[in-house]
Image (cartoon, coloured by chain):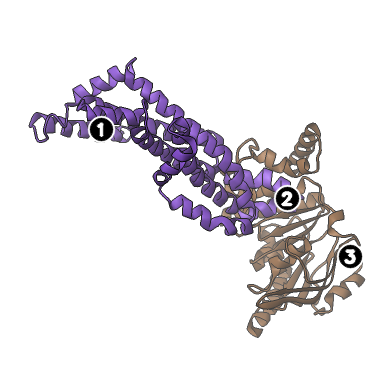
Chain colours: A brown, B purple
Amino acid sequence: MGWESPVARAHEARASRSDAGEVPAVTVRGLTKRFPDAVVYDRFDLDIPRGKLVSIFGPNGCGKSTLINMITGLIPIDAGEILFDGRPLRDIKFGYVFQNYREALFPWLRAIDNIQYPLKLMKLPKAKRRTRTERMVAGLGVKIDLNRYPYELSGGQQQLVSIMRALVVEPQILFLDEPFSALDYEMTLFVRDQLQRIFVETGTTTVLVSHDLEEAVYLADRILLLSRRPATIADYVHYDAARPRSDATLSQHDFVRVKAHCLEIFQREVRKG
Amino acid sequence: MKPVHFDPYLPIIGVVGLIVIWYLAVWYQIVDPVLLPSPVDTFRALWNGLAGGRLGFDFMRTLERTILAILIAAAIAIPLGIALGASERVYRSVEFVVDFFRSTPASAMFPLFLVLFGVGDKTKISVAAFGAALVILFNVAYGVMNARKTRLLAAKVMGASRIRVLTDVMLLESLPQTFVGLRNGVSLALVIVVVAEMFIGSTDGLGQRVFEAQQLFAMPDMYAAIFAAGGLGYGLNLMFLLVERQFVHWSGK
């Protein structure tokens, strides 16, 4: 256990295949994306290891969210290939959690019906939808009155409902786009630890876009550090501290070192701009 | 000492104030008593008129026409508004036309509709429906177009088809704005119906009642009819607000 020397650089994506025991859940090859004013990605390669939690961190506007939006098909790509265990997106189930839970949940549905909505899209019969949702909620040990409407819940509870809505389909991979950014600090801590618990319990491959380095390292097995546009992998850092991690983790030597290293890389990338 | 909460009773102050000023104006004969009858005479005329009198019948006729107009307007404008709002290019191509006719005073359309439908109820109702429909259309289209993008993406990312996104998200997203359109539409429909009743060969309705009372110099009756029209407008608006609160419980939250 412990932090590995960050020898890997831009070739990391390919190198990761040789990392012992890491089978990629997602392989991105030759990804290219141009916006009218800039090239965001140019022949970008990335492997996302299965069963791991990967945090994506990088300078403002480098395309962190764009990356997961392309992987999940929300934004079309100009060139390249994205495969999930060798299969295209439409063959797999995935979950997506938005930053703005207020606008992502459906206010006309009760929390429980929000969570069940993806199952409805899968045309599951009503009874099955309910048992499956109840099982998941019980398994996660969530203590929220799910018969309330989203606007009757706190921000943290709403984001937790969003996360459960993403998890109810039992996704092979879960994407979260800055899920804590719209929450106050107290709620951030609450949802962060709930997310960690969910990850430990389900072992779902998770990709988290973050704008907070501490949170990115705290939650991650791997921290993907991106450069400025066109984004390249500045570093792909391992952080292997045991879970569940807690406040004590934040002051451990390993954590401090990984975070300092990530910050150094980040600063270097920012200065390049 | 427990603070006394007067706040719920504040609206009464305006009503009482108005009646007091009215009384004083009559008492001191600030206004010609022929032009301004006392509140008592007016409310007696209102009561007698509504309770089994002619005014009650006219009230119901105006209500009937306004409701018919808003129903026709909603039946046409809501589906059309959804279709327009769902495609920004379609909307942009007809935006000017809609905006132009929305800005045209509906009363200017009376002669045209008279030629089309004659002097009966059809003309009054259809002009009112025309005016209301444009208001509703605009609001529905606007509501659909301004559906929160994140919410549409959320449905899409969960695998909803385009039709499902429309029925499950866009329609519900547009409901608050649709109700804004309905409330504005019903107010406009009432204005048009009352004006039509005054001038387009009408034998009943609140507009006709106001006009006739004025011609006969029956001032208490005229004021009574005006208050009845005010009550009708206020009541319709309130009704839509209550229905909205019931169906669009998430509005503004």
Q: Which one is in front in this view, the residue at disc 2 or the one at disc 1?
A: 2
- Chain assignment, label 2: B
Badge 2: few (under 14), some or many (20 or more) residues near its Cα, within 10 Å?
A: few
Residue placed at 71% from the left, 53% from the top? Answer: A195
Residue B19 at what x, y percent from top left? Answer: 20, 31
Q: Which one is in front in this view, the residue at disc 3 or the one at disc 2?
A: 2
Horizontally, residue A48 falls left or right of residue A263, namely right
Q: Nearer the viewer, residue A151 or B76?
A: B76
Give the alpha-carbon distance from disc 2 to disc 1, as whole Å: 52 Å
- Chain assignment, label 3: A
The answer to whether mark 3 and mark 2 are in CB contact below 8 A is no
Q: Nearer the viewer, residue A204 or B7?
A: B7
Element class at badge 1:
helix
Badge 1: few (under 14), some or many (20 or more) residues near its Cα, within 10 Å?
A: few
Element class at badge 2:
helix
What number is the disc on residue A22?
3
Of the image marks 2 and 1, the number of the one nearer the N terminus: 1
